[in-house]
Image (tube, rainbow, N blue to C red):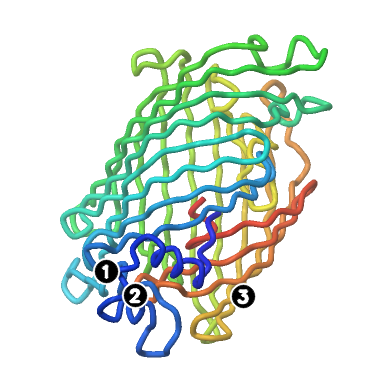
């Protein structure tokens, strides 16, 4: 949820270093093919960092802001390699980023990460670490609480994941490690005990290894227009890996993109998660869709489906429409919730044509909230 306003972006760069005016600096932000604002040439240089103002509009934590600094490594001028006789695949760039921000309810965070694309995209690496103090509401699994309970959580996390291409195919085998360490304090307002929680104040650490098998044929990792992205993942968490609880999580997703009628793109997303064992409250799967608060609908299992349509009415501008439905299953009796619906309208601008990177704004409506999201790339990258 990060906006990039063209005029604001240019002025930020000039403020950072007025000497950049020399040598036709601003020409790097005009695409000579159509005369529109474009960041491709700047990002393709050795100093191609992208300072980005962050505007946070997540309903779970309120309005806020911050700043991020993103760096795109190396060239990305349509680099392609031969994957098999007569077939080529595009190699995406490596990206590094650091960010910090906060919101009106006292939530704040800082962290950094790196997406590494190595050996002509035969190896992919995702790594990051961060710390934050989070203030949210807890609704219980399958919304078992009549009224939400507010909580504060000081948390830091670490992720390390490698994916290896299987021969010259589009399949990847992955291995990773994830750690989340939290200090939690709940404010029950007279409700004791709180269902699903051991106490009103407790520390908790989750740690485990991840195994994955994925397939990726997308034409673009940032704003795909064609192709399939799907993954199966198993996570084994427990004491042996440095955690407090023994539990397993399984997840699967599918994202499919297909152009039609010239300037239209249809996207389909299917997502399912399940948990086995005794896990802390923040590890239970939750419905992750635009217009719905983070952790608002949790359960032992979750499933959702989304459909997105994009209409490019101008080479730089695209309208977006979205609709989705989800369901959760309870921890105790395994009963399913009612269907949970969300819908969305948005607009995108092609800000880096050589990356195929769009940015824009979505207005999404869920069962309880209407929220505004600032997007960079596909909304399904959240």
Left or right: where 344 falls relative to 31 = right
Q: How many marks?
A: 3
At label 3, counting other C-alpha atoms closer than 10 Å, the crowd grade (few under 14, some 14-19, many 20 or more) is: some
Left or right: where 75 falls relative to 137 = left
Foreground: disc 2 or disc 1 = 1
On the image, which quarter does residue 3 sit in?
A: bottom right
Say which element carries label 3.
strand
Residue 224 is situated, as x and y percent measured from the top left of the image, at 44, 67
Between 246 and 191, the one nearer to me in the picture:
191
Residues at discs 2 and 1 in contact (Cβ within 8 Å):
yes
Between 265 and 35, the one nearer to me in the picture:
35
The residue positioned 64% from the left and 68% from the top of the image is 346
| Up-down relation of residue 36 to residue 107 (above or below) | below
- In the rendering, which numbered label is found on residue 44? 1
Mark closer to the chain start, 2 or 1: 1
| Up-down relation of residue 284 to residue 127 (above or below) | above
Foreground: disc 3 or disc 1 = 1
Between 166 and 66, the one nearer to me in the picture:
66
At label 1, counting other C-alpha atoms closer than 10 Å, the crowd grade (few under 14, some 14-19, many 20 or more) is: many
- In the rendering, which numbered label is found on residue 354? 2
Left or right: where 6 falls relative to 29 = right
Say which element carries label 2.
loop
Mark closer to the chain start, 3 or 1: 1
Mark closer to the chain start, 2 or 3: 3
Q: Which residue is mark 3?
A: 319
Between 336 and 48, the one nearer to me in the picture:
48
Residue 266 is situated, as x and y percent measured from the top left of the image, at 56, 71
Residue 214 is situated, as x and y percent measured from the top left of the image, at 36, 49
């Amino acid at each position: 949820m990060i906006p990039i306003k063209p005029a604001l972006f240019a002025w930020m760069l000039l403020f950072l270093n007025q000497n950049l005016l020399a040598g036709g600096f601003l020409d790097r932000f005009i695409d000579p093919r159509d005369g529109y604002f474009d960041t491709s040439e700047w990002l393709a240089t050795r100093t191609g960092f992208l300072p980005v103002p962050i505007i946070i509009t997540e309903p779970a934590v309120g309005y806020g802001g911050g700043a991020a600094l993103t760096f795109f490594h190396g060239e990305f001028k349509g680099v392609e390699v031969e994957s098999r006789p007569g077939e080529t695949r595009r190699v995406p760039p490596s990206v590094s980023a650091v960010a910090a921000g906060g919101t009106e309810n006292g939530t704040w965070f800082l962290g950094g990460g790196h997406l590494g694309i190595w050996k002509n995209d035969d190896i992919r690496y995702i790594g990051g670490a961060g710390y934050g103090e989070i203030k949210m509401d807890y609704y219980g699994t399958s919304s078992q609480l009549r009224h939400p309970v507010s909580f504060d959580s000081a948390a830091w996390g670490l992720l390390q994941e490698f994916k290896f291409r299987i021969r010259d195919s589009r399949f990847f085998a992955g291995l990773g490690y994830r750690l989340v360490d939290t200090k939690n304090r709940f404010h029950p307002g007279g409700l004791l005990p709180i269902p699903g929680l051991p106490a009103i104040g407790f520390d908790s650490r989750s740690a485990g290894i991840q195994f994955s098998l994925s397939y990726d044929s997308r034409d673009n990792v940032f704003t795909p227009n064609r192709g399939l992205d799907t993954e199966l993942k198993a996570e084994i968490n427990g004491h042996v890996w440095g955690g407090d609880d023994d539990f397993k999580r399984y997840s699967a997703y599918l994202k499919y993109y297909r152009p039609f009628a010239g300037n239209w793109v249809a996207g389909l997303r299917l997502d399912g998660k399940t948990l086995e064992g005794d896990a802390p409250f923040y590890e239970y799967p939750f419905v992750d869709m635009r217009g719905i608060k983070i952790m608002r609908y949790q359960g032992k299992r979750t499933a959702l489906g989304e459909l997105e349509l994009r209409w490019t009415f101008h080479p730089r501008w695209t309208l977006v429409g979205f609709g989705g439905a989800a369901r959760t299953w309870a921890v105790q009796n395994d009963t399913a919730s009612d269907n949970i619906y969300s819908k969305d309208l948005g607009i995108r601008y092609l800000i880096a044509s050589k990356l195929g990177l769009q940015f824009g704004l979505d207005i999404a409506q869920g069962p309880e909230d209407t929220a505004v999201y600032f997007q960079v790339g596909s909304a399904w990258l959240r």
